[in-house]
Image: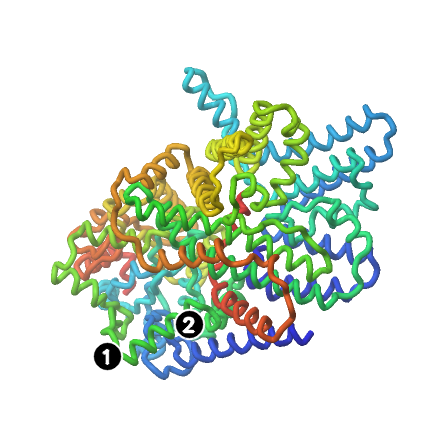
Amino acid sequence: VRFLGLLAAAAMTFLLFAGLFNFVINPAGVFAPSVVPPLLWNPRGDKLALLSAVPEPPQLLVLGSSRVMKLAPRELQRKTGLVAFNGGVSSAAIEDDVAMLQYAVKSRQLPLKMVIIGVEPESFASSQPSNWWMWPPEVIHLLPFRVRAVALFSRYQKLFSASYLRLSLDQLYAVWTGPLPSPARRLDADGLVHWLDREADMAHGNRGFDERLAAHVRDFGNPYAADSTFSDERWREFEALLMQTRASGIRTIVFMTPMLPQLVARLPRGYAAWHAEVARRVHAAAARHGAAFRDFTNPASFGGSIEDFYDGVHYGDDNAARLAHALIRAPSDALQ
Amino acid sequence: MLFNSYIFLFAFLPIVLLGWWMMRGDMPRLLFLTFASYVFYGWWDWRFVPLMIASTTVDYLAGARIAIATEERTRRRWLAASLSFNLLILGFFKYFGFFASTIDGALELAGSRALFPVLNIVLPVGISFYTFNSMSYTIDVYRRIVTPAKSLLHFSAFVAMFPHLVAGPIVRYSDLDHQLSALKRRLTDSDRVLGAYFFVVGLAKKVLIADRLALVVAGFFGSPDQSGAMHAWIGVLAYTFQLYFDFSGYSEMAVGLAYMLGFQFPQNFNSPYKAINISDFWRRWHISLSTWLRDYLFIPLGGSRGGTLRTARNLAITMILGGLWHGANWTFIVWGLYHGVLLASHQLLRGRGWTPGSRSVNRALTFGFVVVGWVFFRASTIGEAARILGLMAGTNGLGTPVSGSSVAIVTVAALISFLAPNPWERTVRPTARLALGLGTAAAACILLLDRPAPFLYFQF
């Protein structure tokens, strides 16, 4: 018994020390004390903070992943007359859209009149990794019920994980050696992102188009390469989200986010067919629940330019403006 | 459920241990253990639990019938019924797709239409292990090596016992019969220490070494064609050690869990990369499978009693079937045949005194042959295996240098495999130093659990 007690005590001490260290260093900025500036960007926390601080309550909310984060709220406001906010967060799956919408409607009680949801196959894939742990606790309870407990667990489990410990050590090292690396992106007050690193990369012509595509496939290849199967839960939550917006009288536009054919050509065989199947299902769901649907997979569909893509899926300001224009094309889309 | 998951470590295992040691009476305890094992198995896919229950029931009934039958013909019929049922299950779930696609492919080549429909059959985890556990029981009852199980519950507990259920060791009923009949009432100090020792050592082998090697393996086998010889060698060596640390880690965790429940499982690995010839390797690698194949296949085929040619034939058949046991793919058949040829050649050479005298040379040669075999074991197709062997031989040149971290983890794994005693060779004394060491290792493993990787042998 003494042997096991000593073994357990050693393990606990080690874990507690690691947990305390991670909590204090807080490299993703998800815990209360931020002794040093976070190393890992947490768009979920930042977007919530911005949404809480907007001077005028938004009436139009953009939801989706990093592939919608360039949609300029000012442009959308000009087209619709509605105060807009971009609530897209990177690596979003459907449950992130659900959380952001619930936060806007229930916690902030925003008078939403329109929601624009950008989706891609990865939004529904069972293999899409979840970043629920990055949501603050007050939003975790707004996530779909099935993931709440896991989200809460994974938030605190991060404290006792090697990956977070490594981030903490990297952050401590960065602070120690200073200066901290300049941020790779910046958010405007309306949620619009500026990809500083990608913009600089393009402006200086650091890497050619092919090189950037190859880098994207290398860095983000896994979600594409993974077994592409629908998550039934995510699909149900997406339909529930559409039902909720319809029931609340919120005009909803769902669109397939752009993806360059040159990128699709580099992805595993079968991806294109899967993408088409997702688009077909999303279209049908949108029609069923009274939402408008736009398929902007191909940049030509919204007059986009291949030149204004950082990689196969993230686009620049010009394409974002064209996308916004194409999104709000029908008179019924401009509500005022 | 994975041994290296939060749900297992922090919920399932504590509940099962508490329940097991707090309950009174053998039958309730066995019922609890069996039920818990079904939960453990069903966590992955509950739909396959009835299949295991059916297999267990058929073998239990067959065992009972064989035991009471007086006529040899009746005994043999019941044995055949049990074996046919098990092989039918295994054949359908594991081999139908392979044989169907092979026959359809051949028919297509001959210009005929496909004969079999394409069925996407899901392979139930651990089916190869529990059918072999179960089959050994009816064969042993038939051979009168063991007496039939006291009750269906005893037999179900033996088949389903979660520590060995999904990836072995392939425990025989004779190993557990007396232990199930005389369950320990309290956990002894020795079992407690050995349980913690084997479990933590196994977990560390898996999480701290095998999973790190997995990154090197994935880096190479993901797109091998562009690699040079250096990357090919480091990738194949990384796989060689990954497989060992992953599978022996699982086996040792299973042994540790068995100790925690008051049972003893047999040793499954005995430093296989220290083997001095290929026969020695098979006495050290996946011992429970190699002895199973020896006792239930090689010896019934005639073993080494009928001269050199007959022995070689028996070895080839045994090893091909051993290869096929791992998976329905030509690569496993070639791997099995390769080992069959190595074993037969070794017997022949040893008989004539043509084996090298130096122990180190023998070890190096054996290791080299085993590494080449693993290329077939890991590759998806024979063609891919051939290409990888070509890369190792330098068909793409030396290539770019390998990263220092890859070399470092492969070197650490090699040093442990070649030089360190295995967990069974150490005398375990419950010292404070050992407790602190195991505690620290356990904590390091827990920190790495946020991305649990399945065990390689789950696919078999």
Q: Which residue is the extreme one toward the top?
A: B111
Residue A135 appears at what percent x and percent y? Answer: 42, 70
Residue B366 appears at what percent x and percent y? Answer: 47, 42
Tell me the chain of label 1. Answer: A
Distance Cα–Cα, label 2 vs label 1:
21 Å
Instruction: State the residue at coordinates (60%, 66%).
Output: B10
B362 or A314: nearer the viewer: B362
Tell me the chain of label 2. Answer: A
Asked if residue B261 lies left or right of residue A304, the reply is right
- Asked which secondary structure carries label 2, the reply is helix
Residue A86's disc number: none
Which amino acid is tagged 1?
Pro
Q: Are marks 2 and 1 on the same chain?
A: yes
Quick check: can you spot residue B285?
yes
- Asked which secondary structure carries label 1, the reply is loop
Residue B156 appears at what percent x and percent y? Answer: 74, 47
**In the rendered view, how is the structure colored?**
rainbow
Quick check: can you spot residue B119?
no
Mark 2 = which residue? A165
Which amino acid is tagged 2?
Leu
Mark 1 = which residue? A179
Mark 1: give few (<14), some (14-19) or many (20+) Cα within 10 Å.
Answer: few
Instruction: State the residue at coordinates (43%, 42%).
Output: B368
Q: Do labels 2 and 1 touch, CB within 8 Å?
A: no
- Mark closest to the chain's N terminus, 2 or 1: 2
Residue B157 appears at what percent x and percent y? Answer: 74, 50
Mark 2: give few (<14), some (14-19) or many (20+) Cα within 10 Å.
Answer: many
